[in-house]
Image (cartoon, rainbow, N blue to C red):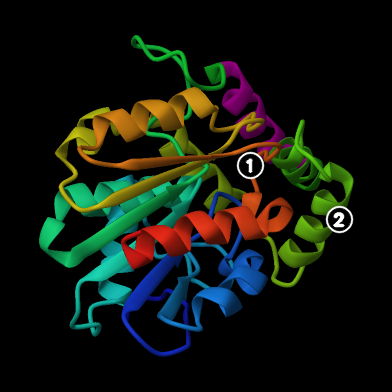
């Protein structure tokens, strides 16, 4: 038993959806229905999030291991669609086990979410440190600030924030310990070498107003992954599946169709 919850919807080639930090797979509900028209969509709640148990995954490789075990019964190579933190899980898995991954789409993600070590396309480390401190003392207020940051600067931000908060509330929030563990993974992960190792067809999608995964990070990813496509969505912040669903669907559908 993996301890992870995996929802399965639709029929066809397997497509795995991986969500972001402090979220759950339910945030993809409207997009999932579109994807399920032609794919068997496997929506994973990452360790300690949504309906998944805390399985003790305290490193990115341990998270990948847990997801791989949860999907071990799928005999075909997988298409991975990872958003934000889920994009890092997808990127690591594709670099580590190329025979298991057919294609990869990275949405509003980054190889490294904090600046430093020659990397400037990211938030200051102090921003994530402040979130970590907030989780210890005021977790609800900290999560509310993070949700607001995801829509900051984007079009239809107020509507998107209300929708995001409604979706997130459909399952209990992860425990502060689980949130802190996943945040520590984000704080320390640097997947620039992994990106260069990807051989599967890849799509990188970014919003041009994303304050969490800046467009420059996506441009870097698209150049580092050989043959990757880049799709930039004007007016979108960090949640394009809520604010710019048609543009995101067009980019992803075109990629999956080989157009």
The quadrant of the image that shows the N terminus is bottom left
* Quarter of the image where the C terminus is located: bottom left
Spot the residue most to the bottom.
11
* Residue at (19, 79) in percent of width and height: 76
> From the viewer's perspective, is 235 left or right of 195?
right
Looking at the image, is 43 positioned above or below residue 201? below
* Magenta extent: 126-138
Task: Give x and y (percent) for residue 158.
Answer: 88, 46
Question: Does residue 128 belong to the magenta stretch?
Answer: yes
Q: Position of residue 44 (x, y in %)?
A: 46, 70
Please report whichever mark, 1 or 2, sits nearer to the chain's N-terminal start: 2
Circle 1 packing at 10 Å, graded few (<14), some (14-19), many (20+), is many
Residue 235 x %, y %: 71, 37
Label disc, if present, on residue 101 of the rendered structure: none
Magenta stretch prevailing secondary structure: helix
Q: Is residue 252 left or right of residue 95?
A: right
Q: Residue at x 66, y 72 (%)?
A: 30
Question: Can see residue 58?
Answer: no
96, 103: nearer the viewer: 103
Foreground residue, 4 or 96? 96
Choose between 127 and 102: the one closer to the eye. Answer: 102
Decide if residue 197 is on the left or right side of residue 228.
left
Real-space Cα separation, disc 1 to disc 2, in angstroms: 14 Å
Label 2's element?
helix
Few, some or many residues within 10 Å of mark 2 (<14, 14–19, 20+): few
Residue 135 at least partly seen? yes
Say the numbered circle drawn on residue 162.
2
């Amino acid at each position: 038993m993996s301890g992870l919850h995996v929802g399965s919807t639709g029929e066809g080639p397997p497509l795995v959806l991986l969500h972001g930090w402090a979220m759950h797979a339910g945030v993809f509900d409207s997009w999932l229905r579109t994807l399920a028209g032609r794919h068997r969509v496997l929506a994973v709640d990452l360790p300690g999030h949504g309906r998944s148990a805390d399985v003790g995954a305290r490193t990115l490789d341990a998270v990948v291991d847990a997801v791989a075990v949860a999907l071990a019964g799928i005999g075909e190579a997988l298409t991975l669609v990872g958003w934000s933190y889920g994009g890092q899980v997808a990127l690591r898995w594709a670099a580590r086990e190329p025979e298991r991954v057919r294609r990869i789409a990275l949405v509003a993600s980054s190889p490294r979410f904090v600046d430093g070590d020659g990397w400037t396309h990211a938030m200051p480390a102090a921003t994530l440190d402040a979130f970590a401190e907030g989780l210890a003392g005021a977790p609800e207020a900290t999560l509310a600030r993070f949700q607001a940051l995801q829509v900051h600067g984007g079009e239809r931000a107020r509507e998107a924030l209300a929708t995001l908060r409604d979706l997130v509330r459909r399952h209990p929030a992860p425990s502060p310990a689980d949130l802190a563990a996943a945040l520590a993974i984000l704080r320390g992960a640097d997947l620039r070498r992994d990106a260069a190792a990807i051989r599967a067809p890849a799509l990188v999608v970014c919003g041009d107003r994303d304050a969490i995964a800046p467009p420059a990070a996506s441009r870097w990813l698209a150049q580092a992954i050989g043959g990757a496509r880049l799709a930039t969505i004007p007016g979108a912040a960090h949640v394009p599946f809520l604010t710019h669903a048609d543009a995101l669907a067009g980019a992803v559908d075109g990629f999956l169709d080989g157009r």
